[in-house]
Amino acid sequence: MNRFNSITILLVFSLITAASSVSAQPVRGLHLTNPPGRDNLELFLKFIREALPKEGVNTLVLEFDYSYQFESHPELASPGALGKAEVKQIVEACRDAKVELIPQINCLGHQSWSKTTSALLTKYPEFDETPGKYPDNEGIYCRSWCPYHPEVHKIVFELIDELAAACEAKAVHVGMDEVFILADKDCPRCKDKSAAEAFAYEINTLHDHLASNGLTMWMWSDRFIDGKVTGIGEWEASENGTAAAIDMAPNDIVMCDWHYEAAHPTAMFFAVKGFPVVSCPWRKPEVALGQLQLMDTARMYANNKTGERLRGMLHTTWCGTVPFMNAYYNEGRNSNRGNNSNRSAIETVNTFKVLFEAMRKK
Ligand SMILES: [Zn+2]
C-alpha cells in the first residue's frame, strides 16, 4: 500500500468516525396538512401517541389555515373543522408523546388554490392584493393579501393568537412560500414598493406580533434564495425579486428550507446568514438522505455559533393528514395500485420512514 492510499483510508476512516459522532438533530419534525375532522380524530391521537415517538418525531407542524372553529371569526372557519376541545386532545397527545406542536396558518400568499379562494379573501375581498383581477383565479398560482391594507392584520392576528392559544404553542409557522403576487402595480398601497420591501414588511409585521407574545416564527424560506443566481428556479427559490428581503428579516425566524428534487446545500446559506434552519424533503428518499447528510456534515464542521443554527429536519407530506396516516398504517399493502394521490401519500410515507430510520441511528 502506498502512502497516498494509506492517507486516503485514514481520511475516510476519520470522516466516518466523525460523522457517527454528530449528535442527534435537535429538530426531527413532521409537517402535516389538512387536520382530520372529528371522524378521524381518534386515529390521529393514536398516531401522535404511538407512531411519532416510535419514529423519533419530536416536532409536529400542523397546517390548519382556516380549518379551525375560530371563535374570534366564525365567518372564516371551515365547516366541520376541529374546535378548541378537540385541539386540546391533540395538545395532550403531543405532550404525552413529547412532541412540540406548532400550528401553521398560511400568511400573505396561498390565499387561493385553483378556482377556490380561501376564506379570508372570500369574506374580505378588500384585503386582496389584486381585487377584481384574474376572475376565477385564471392565470395565477395563488392569491395574496395586501400587506399594507390597514385592516388585514387585526383579523390575521386574532386568528393566529387564537390558534396559538388553542395549541398552547411556543412557535407559529406562517407559511409564506411561493408568493408570486406581491407589490402589484395596480394596488394603490403597493404600486411604488419593491417585492422585497413588501415581503419584508409582512415578515416584520408578523414577527413583531408573534415576538410580543413570546412566540417564535417559522416560515418557508424559498423566497429568500435567488433562483437565478443559484439555478434553483422560481419555485424552490425566487425569481420575483424577493431574495433581497433576507437582509431585512429578523434573525430569530426559523427558516424551513424545502427542496424536493435535489438536496441543494442551502441550509448552510441560512445558518451563515444568521438564521436557525431546518431542511425539508418530501417524497424522494435520496433527497431526504442527502439533506440529512449535508446537515450532519455542516454541523460537524461548523463552529458553535453557526452550528447551533443548523437545527435538523422537517419532513413534508402534502397529501393531507388522513391519507398520510392511512398510507403509514397500510405500508406495502396497496403500493401498486391506487390513484396519484395515494401514490403520493405512499411515497412521502416511505421517504419519512427512510429519513427517520437514518436519524434514529445517530
Ligand atoms: Zn398592496
Image (spheres, helix red, strand yellow):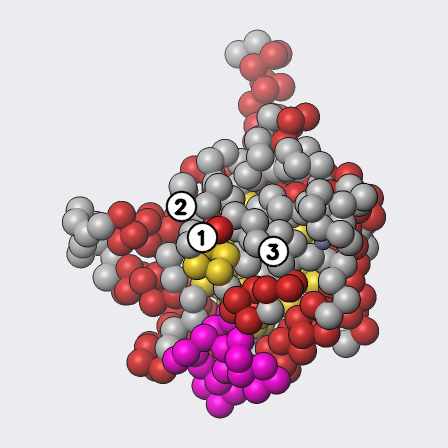
- Sequence-first tag of 1 and 2: 1
Q: What secondary structure do most residues of the magenta stretch adopt?
A: loop
Disc 3 target residue? 131
- The three-letter code of the residue at mark 1 reads Asp
- Sequence-first tag of 3 and 1: 3
Q: CA distance from mark 3 to mark 1?
A: 12 Å
Percent position (x, y) of residue 356?
A: 45, 54
Does 112 appear in magenta? no
To which quarter of the image does residue 195 belong? top right
Mark 2 crowd level (few <14, some 14–19, many ≥20, 10 Å Cα): many
Q: Label 2's element?
A: loop
- Sequence-first tag of 2 and 3: 3
Percent position (x, y) of residue 362?
A: 53, 52
Read off the magenta span. 64-86
Give me the residue at 81% from left, 73% from top: 212
Disc 1 target residue? 136
Percent position (x, y) of residue 44?
A: 38, 75
Mark 1 crowd level (few <14, some 14–19, many ≥20, 10 Å Cα): few
Disc 2 target residue? 283
- The three-letter code of the residue at mark 3 reads Pro
Asked if the residues shown at circle 3 and circle 1 are in contact, with their CB atoms under 8 angstroms apart, the answer is no
Q: CA distance from mark 1 to mark 2?
A: 31 Å
